[in-house]
Image (cartoon, rainbow, N blue to C red):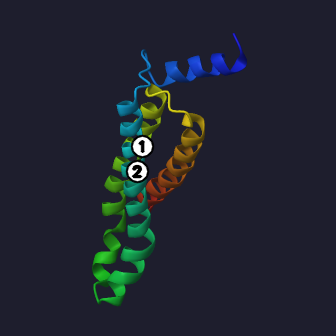
């Protein structure tokens, strides 16, 4: 067994995947989930960096800008859920670029996790 096969087996075990289905519908579903997860993660960033700190105060709604953590934490948790689900979906579908997509997801998960932790810390 090659290193690549061993690594794949370990990843399947971590993601709790027992059966691979590399049919076209499963691959298309994985791509749709990737798009959705990236939109949710992007929404989290737009809220954190544009709407809450800049737009709301500019519109005279500065008091609502302090709700950033209350909005950011749930959106971040939802984004993380869909990111993990997306990684799993690519591996279940045995997607051709599953490793590259996993790397992208892991970078997004790192950023969103940092933002969620920062929001939690700001509550205290």
86 left or right of 74? right
For residue 35, the mark is: 2
Looking at the image, is 119 positioned above or below residue 46? above
CA gap, disc 1 and disc 2: 6 Å
Where in the figure is residue 39, as x and y percent of width and height?
A: 39, 57
Where in the figure is residue 104, as x and y percent of width and height?
A: 56, 47
Answer yes or no: is residue 33 visible.
yes
Please name the residue that numbered disc 1 is placed on: 31
User: Which residue is at the far top?
Assistant: 1
Residue in the image at 59% along x and 35% along y: 99
Q: Secondary structure at mark 2?
A: helix
Which residue is nearer to you in this view: 102 or 24?
Answer: 24
Check if mark 1's residue and mark 2's residue have beta carbons within 8 Å. Answer: yes
Residue in the image at 31% along x and 61% along y: 70
Residue in the image at 29% along x and 90% along y: 60
Labels in figure, total:
2
């Amino acid at each position: 067994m090659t290193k690549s096969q061993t690594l794949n087996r370990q990843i399947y075990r971590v993601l709790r995947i027992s059966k691979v289905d590399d049919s076209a519908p499963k691959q298309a579903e994985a791509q749709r989930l990737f798009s959705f997860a990236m939109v949710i993660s992007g929404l989290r960033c737009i809220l954190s960096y544009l709407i809450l700190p800049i737009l709301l105060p500019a519109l005279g709604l500065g008091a609502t800008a302090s709700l950033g953590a209350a909005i950011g934490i749930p959106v971040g948790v939802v984004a993380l859920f869909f990111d993990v689900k997306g990684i799993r979906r690519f591996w279940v579908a045995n997607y051709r670029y599953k490793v590259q997509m996993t790397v992208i997801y892991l970078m997004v998960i790192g950023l969103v996790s940092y933002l969620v932790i920062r929001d939690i810390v700001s509550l205290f």
